[in-house]
Amino acid sequence: MTWDDRLLQFETRRHFFGRCGVGLGRLALASLISDRALFGATAKPSNPMAPKAPHFPAKVKNVIYLFMAGAPSQLELFDYKPKLQEYDGKTAPESLLKGKRFAFMDSFTKDPPKLLGARREFQRHGKSGLYLSELLPNIGTVADDIALLSGVSTDNFNHGPAKCFVNTGSVRFGRPSIGAWVTYGIGSESEDLPGFVVLESGPRGPRGGAALWSSGFLPSAYQGVPFRSGGDPILDLSSPKGITERTQRQSLDAIRDLNLAKLAETGDPEITTRIAAYEMAYRMQTSGPELIDFSKETRQTLEMYGAEPGKSSYANNCLLARRLVERGVRFVQLYHADWDHHADLGQPLDQVCREIDRPTAALIRDLKQRGLLEHTLVIWGGEFGRTPMGEVRERNKVGRNHHIDAYSLFLAGGGIRGGQVVGGTDELGFTPTERIHIHDLQATLLHLLGLDHTRLTFPFQGRQFRLTDVGGQVINKLLT
Amino acid sequence: MMTSMPPKLQILAFLAAAPLAAQPFTPQALSFFETSVRPILKNSCHPCHNQRTRSSGLALDTREDVLTGGNRGPAVQPGAPGESRLLQAVEQTGELKMPKGGRLKDEQIAVLRQWIEQKVPWPDEGAQKRPGWNHWSFQTPQRPAVPAVKDSAWVRNPIDPFVLARLERESVKPSPEADRNTLLRRLSFDLTGLPPTPQESQAFLADVSPNAYEKVVDRLLASPHYGERWGRHWLDLARYADSDGYTIDAPRQIWKYRDWVIQALNRDLPFDQFVIEQIAGDLLPHPTTDQLIATGFHRNTTSNYEGGIDFEQYRVEAVADRVATTGAAFLGLTVGCARCHDHKYDPITQREFYQLFAFFNNTTEIASESERYRFNQPMLDLATPEEQARREANRAQVAMLSRELAEYAAALAARPAEPGDPPKHQDPGLRERVANLAALRRRLPPITSTLVMRDLPEPRQAYIHLGGDFLRHGAPVSPGVPAVLSSAPVTGNRLDLARWLADPANPLTARVTVNRMWQAYFGKGLVETENDFGLMGAKPTHPELLDWLATEFVARGWSQKAMHRLIVTSATYRQSSRHRPDLEEADPYNRLLARQTRLRLEAEILRDAALVSSGLLTPVIGGPSVYPPIPEGAMAITQVKRAWPTATGPDRYRRGLYTFYYRSIPHPGLALFDAPDATAACTRRFRSNSPLQALTLLNDEAYIEFARALAKRILKDAPAADAARLDYAFLLALGRHPKPVERDRLARLLALQRDEYRSDPTSASLLVVKEQVFDSSPGGNRDLGETVDPKQVPELAAWTALSRVLFNLDDFLTRE
């Protein structure tokens, strides 16, 4: 039972403090207000993050979304296209490009673009024989756990709006993000940590910033809490210099007592929410440092991830993500930059793949070993894909432009049938063979959490809004 | 007069007027329509194309509908079947094939052809109205009579009978008046956003005259801080921020607009003029600089100039945002819903959305890649005399150095090369001169400017965007306003739109505005859906009061101050905010207004309250936005790293509304307490209540600084006895004396903290001895930079801990 539940249950002050005293354990509960009756009114506290029942039984409890900011090239990583190899260097057929729009159109359309075969080799992996790039040898070892979505389409070809679209279902900034929708829908099971946590790594933050984990028009309690990769994981988590542990606790006791007196005087239920919020803040001060302290992790675990305590890295964030879901945090989103390989699919792509391959595989394996994978959904993917045509910006180098019609993502975890490819693309990797849209991915994610995407709505500006706008169909082929 | 027009225009005018003019049709033609044509329309077209569904914007209910057509343009050209979309569609010869279920019979198509050839006969069925046209909020408010009440002694002004009559009907008594301390604090926060000082409290408590309360109201309305308080409410609607938004989010200068709003409110610029200057100040005859600055209202749109974008897409986004913001701020309607299709609930068509769009579509913002480097235009140059002088000095120096460089280069070119000389372009003298010139150019001082509206000499043609897609142009449209809101057509330019918005006959502007005022005072409006007065919106809880206030607003010359004075002097406003156990069941949401409402202070006001309590506030009004301390690392998540030059002088202690606002990373102290994100008009703020807020108030260095200053103030100003000091501390932070139970609880905390810091002098020093000594720029640094007597350190630390507790109390965070 959570502290907030206990608060919900109190009938009398004595009862409240009695239970509270048990719950808070180590905390001194001396020095309470004088004995006059304090509670005239029945309070109705509300904890916005309290776990709520889903629409139907859920397959998973938690989500770890590994967001690859900048748009990884599916043709170098996942979408194996021998035919494209044959056409390498040939001018792209006009029928392919007619009526299509691309980013950087002006520079792009000067010469007819040439098709570009994959710059990497592919091998089959696992019992399922899933094709994966030589750039992802470690992910290859968990191939039977992952389901590859191929031929995914999205709506906008610029990074910022496209990231916004994947996260909020709209290209316009200001709508609630997936994590906000999920915690609004079913709350979180963590008593000591926020329900929606954002972690970042790579050379720069994702384009779009806080809008990507915004609560939009939902109450702000549901916005993602961006942990910092170094120092305090949460802003203002440490007590200020000179505020001792005892001062902090004694201050919180005084704040609580005086707030209780105010509650008794005014009968305003908002005060009970505030009392609960202050206790959660205090518990976060304790749980936060413990959360980021990797010293209890075995050397084997650290090596599996490639995590180095104290360093800011994707590997550390993957380990932190496992620790967060272990502690009941509902939605963890990692951002890793930078995948925008317009100019060079060589060394820069090697580099970023090296950064993510081992930790991603380690996360899936680690979750599985600990029995967490069966109730956690892991998603790996960017905001769109890249063209089968090459792009030449620098001499002797080649990259790929943005392509929104047919990209790849993968999923693993509870409810997901691993070792399969869902969807597909034509032989050049340009056009999907069946329509799988980002709204479908969002609908599926909610479905796995026991939420019907058409029923998870919020009234705003005169209509009911939802994550999937007016689209979205659960991708049943993905599911067990 | 037709005769005064050039012949070509005459023809155009004739063509424009002809289709809608009443046509006398022969009885035979009308009979043909009724017996042959109407059944086809009814059975084959009407299921999708009626005034309710309007598939593709097209309704076929009236002759006017048919001639106006849908998103693709008119459905028929009378007399010209070959040019009529409707006929093309049913013949299924082109892209458009109708009806969806299958082709009409050839004889039916022939009937439609004949009907068009006969110039579309249709009986005159009178003005057909769309469903919803008679919705209450679309009718101009009529002045209601003030109702009679039994308990007339409770009534203080005409607001009260409206509230009391309802309460009496429900047999509910209003709450008693709040105590005087609470009233003063409530008034001060509501009108100026600042808590009263102890002197102000004393003066009010000592004033026994019958109009003591009204005197305070007048003092607060005359305070320059009134403009800051109500200006910030307006800036929420204006989506004001100091940066461009989207992913690059560079700083922009538009604070002059923010200051214009503050000043306009302080001089009580009539609201109609307030609207006109913001929407179309640039189109007024001989606009003043102030009127140009006011047009910044609609330049608070975000700008995108990320690599690879289509500039036209984001120009269209900005124009659509102006329509949506105009709808939300003045009309209380969700007109943005009609961007991709006709409004699902309100009688607003997609065509009408784009007619509103057409008013805003003519600004000179860039629309293509070739203009990339002038994306934030137009800007109004507002260089101060000093800036002007510096700019001219710089220009003169640049001119001089350029001349000198040219001469040197010429001489260099003329000089024969000696063996051993470097290549001429690497000549050290040349390179030095080039570098000096570049450095001088970079030293061009920053010039004050502000974003304003400016129209193109020739308007851009506006179109319906099919499905809301900026690439898919449908029928062209001209400026206009939703038909249900105006008895006469409104067209022309933004100034015509502004005048229509500010016209007393406009059914919505006054209602929506007084409703938002009410919302600020009671937590929610008389219409709870303050952004939706349409068919799906909430019905007003007190419809007569709303209309009385709306008509009163106009009658008082659109004076906002007069309306504020009216509301806050009502008995309704002066009630206690205590929850009423007797109403928990009957009126849990306080819709009857049988009490006031406790409201958590807004993000900026919370900071202001702490600044006033601690005595640190720098009460300067206006100027460029400032950089108070920000938690370490808070700025680390933007795509482009942004500097945060933390203020060390008086700007460190400016009011919250002056904090520099980056859209991509708002100051955490603002964002965590629900300041709007400035991407769209915010008509009402959330009041969330989260653990992260607790962490900010407990642990943020800014609040420790306030607590330290409050502690020093207590020790310096109050008599040296704990009881007196506790009373003073309470008075400074909460505007009242503590109750005995509160004083006892604080005394116990104080005793514990004294023990703590006496036994741990190191922590005491860390808490109260500042590491950083601020330079004292003009005005000085009020954070008492003086060294603390070492003997005083534990005592000061204990009082700092106590002050910190005061800043975390629900009482401190809440307007009662």
Image: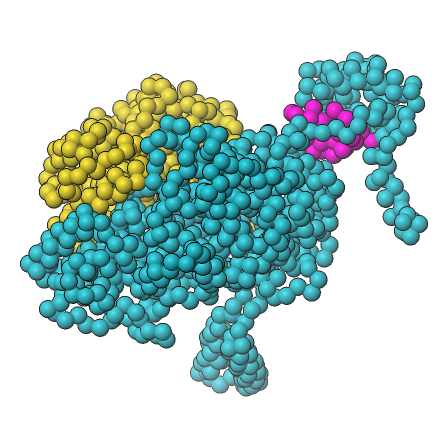
Chain colours: A yellow, B cyan
Residue B480 occupies quadrant: top right
Q: Residue at x 52, y 32 (%)?
A: B538
Is residue A277 or residue A348 the one in the foreground? A277
Q: Position of residue A40 (x, y in %)?
A: 25, 34
Q: Residue at x 64, y 40 (%)?
A: B142
Q: Is residue B550 visible?
A: yes
Considering the whole magenta stretch, tell me its main secondary structure: loop
Where is the N terminus of chain A found, in terms of image quarters? top left
Is residue B750 or residue B563 the one in the foreground? B563
Q: Is residue A203 visible?
A: no
B220 above or below B37? below
Identify the residue at the far left of this view: B759
Q: Residue at x 41, y 20 (%)?
A: A477
Number of numbered labels in the structure image: 0
Residue B719 occupies quadrant: bottom left
Q: Position of residue A202 (x, y in %)?
A: 33, 48
Q: Residue at x 69, y 29 (%)?
A: B130
Where is the C terminus of chain A found, in terms of image quarters? top left
B603 displayed left or right of B126:
left
Stretch of the chain drawn in magenta: B49-77
A153 displayed left or right of B184:
right
A10 above or below B479? above
Q: Position of residue B149 (x, y in %)?
A: 51, 36
B658 above or below B99? below
